Image (cartoon, coloured by chain):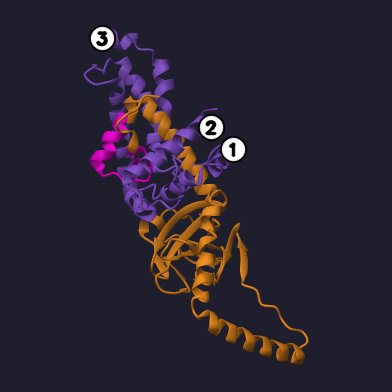
Amino acid sequence: MKKCNLENMIGDYLFDRLDETQKEKFEEHYFNCPQCFEKMEQTDEMITVIKANGSEIFRDVYAPQKTRRSRLESVLAFLTPRQWTMAAVSAALILVVAIGVIPNFIKTTSPEFFINDDLVRGSSIALISPVIDNLDQVPSEFRWQSVGNKTEYKLFIYHQEELLWTTTTMDNFVTLSENIKSLMAPSKKYSWQVKAFSAEGTLIAVSSRVQFCFVTSK
Amino acid sequence: MEKRNKDLDLDAIVAKYRPVVSFRVKKSIGVRTPDWEDVVNEIMINVVEKLKKDEFRGDSSIGTFIYTITSRRIIDFIRKKSKVLKYAPEPNPYLSPQEHVENRERAQWIADSIEKLNPKYKEVLYLYYYQELSRDEVAKKLNISSRRVSERVNYAQKLLRKVMKE
């Protein structure tokens, strides 16, 4: 396939990142360049697949092993080896007493959640609003419980199983613009979900997916 | 000049440009606007009429000629719609003109092919297309140059294109 110098505008065009002039230039171009049009159709199809099945496709990118090890290392670095020995001895003593006193010793494991195929170690995000199913109008704000500083949240709004809109924020809420609201129609089933990412971009928490629908679109 | 228009194979033109016009219309007014198909039909009828009336003078390419007709019709449509709707329909942020990949098996096949890619390429696709970061943001995150990002995205797509063409 021939290389075309406008070809690298495809992604930006599909994501609406071009300014008006560039956009028109590229549009006129693909009316004249079958190669670019074909590539754009393929890119669009690929993005559609990625958007619909991303959590599955990128499962390994979501939950890298690296962060777990570094967390363990930082815990180990908290005390010197000698202090660790002392701590271990005292812990053993306490354990003996504890087992003697409480026969049904409860094992503690790190919490694990399975939500939409994303395996997440850590906490879950509690969604605050909207959490009731029947609203009287389009929700203008989505709010959830903060899980700490320097966390980036990604809000996902779905129409049935399809991703309708997504955005990222450092706050624990998102206010919808009129444009986004106009994408939603009354009495259809929508759901929303929030994912939290650390400053390094690692997925650290996921909320459950909460459904909502509304009656009028005033 | 007049001969030129009569020599044009109208069926071939319609067959060739219909997908292009459809893509442009869906991208502009949104696939969720149920009228998009009517708009495409109107444009194609208009193109054929104009060609029959010898209105294509050949001072631009036929592609540009059809592009101009398409753009005018879309602007018209949005203007009329925004009077009624208050807000013009806007396909934001990512609403694919394709809406959904028709064949489920094909979608799964493409998904599997992406999953099997070298992590180096997969990571770039994840950040660039899934998280919708800009080239510069991806570059910063991976600590490579923006040009490198483009190269990787292009290469990954080249590999996938082979699969998708089959």
Q: Chain of mark 2?
A: B
Between disc 2 and disc 3, whose residue precedes? Answer: 3
- The picture quadrant where one finds residue A178 is bottom left
Identify the mark at residue B163; answer none if there is no mark. Answer: 2
Q: Which residue is the site of mark 1?
A: B109
Give x and y (percent) for residue B67.
31, 29
Q: Which mark is residue B2?
A: 3
Per the rendering, the colour in which chain B appears is purple
The span from disc 2 to disc 3 (Cα, nearest Å) is 45 Å
Tags 3 and 1 on a common chain:
yes
Residue contact at pointers 1 and 2, CB within 8 angstroms: yes
B83 with respect to A110 (left or right): left
Both marks 2 and 3 on one chain: yes
Q: In the rendered picture, chain A carries what hue?
A: orange
Q: Residue furthest toward the front?
A: A82
In the image shown, does B31 or A118 lie closer to the viewer? A118
Q: Position of residue B46 (x, y in %)?
A: 34, 25
**Kind of element beneath mark 3:** helix
Q: Main secondary structure of the magenta part?
A: helix
Q: For the C terminus of chain A, which image quadrant?
A: bottom left
